[in-house]
Image: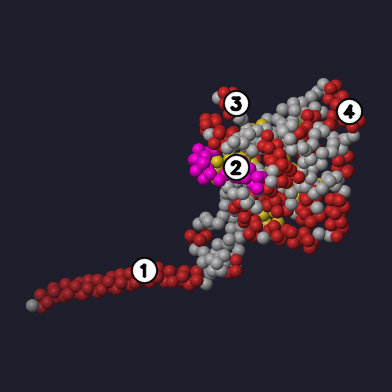
């Protein structure tokens, strides 16, 4: 019995030990499960507290694209509650700023002296007011233009306008003074043949010569300023850098091969849908595409619908504008192209990028063109003033018709009121909707940059600089604000005679400057197929 009792004790001890181990494991497991349950809850609560106090950034808010941005824009970085209020006065819970910020823009001053390459400048001859010029300048600053050479006269040369233009970084204002015309009268252009057919004619021909002389001077200024590219553009034209990785002209031109001398931007023409447009850059979104950007069968197959009884597919020119690489012996070749005295430039034409030409977008453009020229409103005489048929017709109507007749003519020839036709041509690809310039310029306007530039110019421009501006504009040879006179530019009759002799005896001549040209007409179909 004792032996039996003795032999059973180890078995009892082993059972007790096993029971204790099992209880310990259950306790550990329970605690582990409790810890694993409490830990994520604690971390979630801690994260909620930090985010509620502003210590964390919601990853979705941080990395999601801003619906108010357009390509090339970045967040402004403003986090103050006042900046996060929407137009309705409510706080923007996502913390995103509605204030636009642009890639080449710092503290409301474009860094025009930066090391970003390539450096691009625009040269323009203008008589426009600030309502057109300021959006034009700052839009092109947004897409990467650093410097502007503005040859001003008329309204653009008036003190109230010119002092604002002079206050903008990167803008160089050149007045049409007696001294300027005397200097341009000595240009070698007068002794050459390529521009000779445009000399000594009024209105658009004279403007064409002025633009060429101004372009020649701008080349020298661009070289001195260290520019890489130069573009001639009117203040009713905007570069549309489609096809670049960003909405950036800098990006577009940086991708051009180094052996290319000139880049051609085909032009698109505005197609206004109302007769009461006030601000074309922010009210016009429909454009007629250039022949170069359309299949031939689409262009000619819809030619009559797209022309709508006008003399041509486009109201005015259709041969685009160009950018030239700054290099030795560069010269203008009329307002639309550049050339070189020592070689034939290598030229490429862009497949997507374009110049948006806002053509007769306002009804008042009819009378403004009439008031700039002194030609007689006859079919024969207008040929002396205008190179393109529609400009001639518009001048005659504006000079002979009543206000009501002019408005009727404008609606029939310029305004696109037939919505069914518009939709048909949009589907065919003849018409296109382009919103980027509207977004950029509207963003600039809402930011207050235009009003702040005007206000700062009024308060910061020195008295001496203002008086110089007044003196320069008063000494301008422009007869009236906005009017281009029909005088011969800076030359006397004796000089003209001498130059005509040089024309004949000069053995080394060039092809004629490229004027504004209309797109192909329907009769040319057999020539291009």
The mark that comes first in sequence, 1 or 3, is 1
Q: Which region shows up in magenta?
A: 404-430
Give the x, y percent position of residue 6.
Answer: 14, 76
The mark that comes first in sequence, 2 or 4, is 2
Q: CA distance from mark 3 to mark 4?
A: 39 Å
Q: Secondary structure at mark 4?
A: helix
Residue where numbered disc 2 is placed = 412
Q: CA distance from mark 1 to mark 4?
A: 100 Å
In the image, is 181 to the left or to the right of 270?
A: right
In the image, is 393 to the left or to the right of 18?
A: right
Q: CA distance from mark 1 to mark 3?
A: 81 Å
Q: Secondary structure at mark 2?
A: helix
Say which residue appears at 77% left-offset and 50% top-offset.
156
The mark that comes first in sequence, 1 or 4, is 1
- The numbered mark at residue 36 is 1
The mark that comes first in sequence, 1 or 2, is 1
Residue where numbered disc 4 is placed = 497
Q: CA distance from mark 2 to mark 4?
A: 46 Å
Q: In this orientation, which residue lies closer to the viewer: 31 or 123?
A: 123
In the image, is 462 to the left or to the right of 314?
A: right
Q: Is residue 113 visible?
A: no
Queried whether the magenta region covers residue 411, the answer comes back as yes
Give the x, y percent position of residue 405.
Answer: 65, 45
Residue where numbered disc 3 is placed = 524
Say which residue appears at 60% left-offset and 69% top-offset.
82
Q: Are marks 3 and 2 in contact (CB under 8 Å)?
A: no
Q: Secondary structure at mark 3?
A: helix
């Amino acid at each position: 019995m004792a032996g039996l009792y003795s032999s059973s004790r180890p078995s009892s001890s082993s059972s007790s030990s096993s029971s204790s181990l099992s209880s310990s494991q259950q306790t550990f497991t329970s605690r582990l499960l409790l810890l694993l349950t409490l830990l994520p809850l604690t971390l979630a609560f801690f994260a909620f507290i930090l985010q509620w106090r502003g210590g964390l950034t919601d990853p979705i808010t941080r990395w999601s694209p801003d619906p108010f941005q357009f390509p090339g824009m970045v967040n402004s970085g403003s986090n103050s509650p006042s900046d996060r209020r929407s137009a309705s006065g409510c706080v923007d819970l996502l913390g995103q700023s509605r204030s636009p910020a642009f890639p080449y823009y710092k503290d409301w001053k474009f860094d025009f002296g930066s090391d970003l390459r390539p450096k691009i400048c625009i040269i323009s001859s203008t008589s426009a007011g600030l309502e057109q010029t300021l959006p034009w300048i700052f839009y092109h600053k947004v897409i990467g233009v650093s410097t502007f050479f503005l040859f001003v006269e008329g309204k653009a040369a008036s003190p109230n306008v010119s002092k604002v233009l002079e206050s903008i970084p990167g803008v160089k204002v050149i007045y049409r003074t007696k001294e300027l015309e005397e200097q341009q009268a000595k240009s070698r252009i007068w002794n050459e043949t390529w521009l000779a057919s445009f000399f000594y004619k009024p209105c658009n021909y004279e403007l064409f010569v002025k633009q060429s002389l101004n372009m020649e001077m701008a080349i020298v200024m661009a070289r001195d300023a260290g520019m890489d590219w130069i573009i001639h553009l009117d203040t009713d034209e905007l570069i549309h850098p489609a096809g670049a990785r960003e909405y950036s002209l800098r990006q577009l031109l940086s991708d051009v091969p180094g052996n290319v001398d000139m880049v051609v931007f085909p032009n698109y023409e505005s197609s206004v849908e109302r007769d009461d447009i006030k601000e074309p850059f922010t009210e016009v979104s429909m454009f007629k595409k250039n022949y170069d950007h359309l299949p031939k069968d689409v262009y000619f197959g819809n030619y009559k619908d797209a022309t709508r009884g006008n003399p041509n597919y486009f109201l005015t020119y259709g041969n685009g504008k160009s950018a030239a690489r700054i290099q030795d012996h560069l010269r203008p070749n009329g307002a639309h192209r550049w050339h070189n005295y020592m070689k034939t430039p290598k030229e490429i034409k862009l497949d997507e990028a374009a110049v948006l030409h806002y053509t007769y977008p306002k009804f008042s453009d009819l009378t403004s063109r009439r008031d700039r020229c002194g030609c007689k409103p006859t079919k024969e005489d207008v040929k002396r003033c205008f190179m393109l048929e529609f400009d001639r017709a518009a001048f005659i109507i504006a000079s002979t018709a009543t206000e009501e007749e002019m408005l009727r003519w404008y609606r029939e020839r310029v305004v696109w009121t037939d919505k069914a036709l518009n939709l048909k041509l949009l589907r065919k690809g003849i018409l296109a909707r382009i919103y980027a310039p509207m977004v950029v310029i509207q963003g600039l306007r809402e930011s207050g940059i235009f009003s702040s530039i005007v206000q700062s110019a009024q308060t910061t421009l020195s008295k001496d600089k203002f008086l110089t501006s007044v003196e320069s504009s008063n000494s301008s040879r422009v007869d009236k604000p906005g009017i281009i006179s029909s005088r011969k530019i800076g030359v006397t009759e004796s000089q003209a005679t001498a130059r005509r002799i040089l024309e004949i005896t000069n053995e080394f001549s060039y092809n004629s400057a490229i004027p504004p040209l209309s797109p192909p007409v329907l009769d040319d179909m057999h020539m291009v197929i």
